[in-house]
């Protein structure tokens, strides 16, 4: 028999996030891009991967810095 521990949301402490693209794309977390076909999701994904892996700023000029690793699935 397995036991289940319960944690109330009120007991969870908030932590600051490290952002790759502030307000849009958190670092070290799984992110999902969803939308209808033909809207440019693949183009946006490859553009963001290129920016992140080279340390260039995001489309709005924020972010950038040290290059980071990227995993695309």
Image (tube, grey):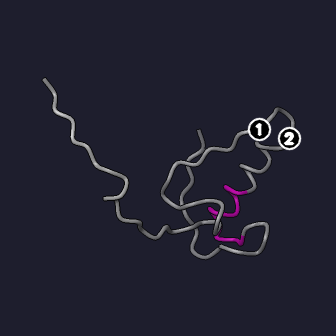
Residue highlighted by disc 1 = 35
Q: Is residue 8 magenta?
A: no
The location of residue 33, given as percent across then percent down, is 68, 44
State the extent of the magenta-drawn residues as a range.
Answer: 48-57
Mark in the foreground, 1 or 2: 1
The quadrant of the picture occupied by the C terminus is top right
Would you identify the image quadrant in which residue 41 lies? top right
Quick one: SS at disc 2? loop
Residue at 46%, 70% in the rendered image: 16
Q: Is residue 4 left or right of residue 42?
A: left
- Label 1 to label 2, Cα distance in Å? 7 Å
Packing grade of label 1 (10 A; few <14, some 14-19, many >=20) is few
Quick one: SS at disc 1? loop
Q: Is residue 54 magenta?
A: yes
Would you identify the image quadrant in which residue 35 lies? top right
Q: Nearer the viewer, residue 10 or 71?
A: 10
Residue highlighted by disc 2 = 39
Q: Do the residues under discs 1 and 2 have CB atoms within 8 angstroms? A: yes
Q: Characterize the magenta stretch by its predominant secondary structure.
A: helix
Residue at 71%, 72% in the rendered image: 57
The location of residue 71, given as percent across then percent down, is 55, 48
């Amino acid at each position: 028999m397995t036991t289940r521990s319960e944690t109330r949301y009120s007991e969870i402490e908030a932590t600051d996030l490290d952002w790759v693209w502030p307000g849009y794309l958190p670092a070290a977390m799984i992110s999902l891009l969803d939308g209808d076909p033909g809207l440019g999701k693949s183009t946006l994904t490859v553009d963001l991967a290129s920016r992140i892996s080279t340390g260039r700023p995001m489309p709005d000029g924020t972010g950038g810095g040290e290059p980071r690793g990227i995993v695309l699935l």
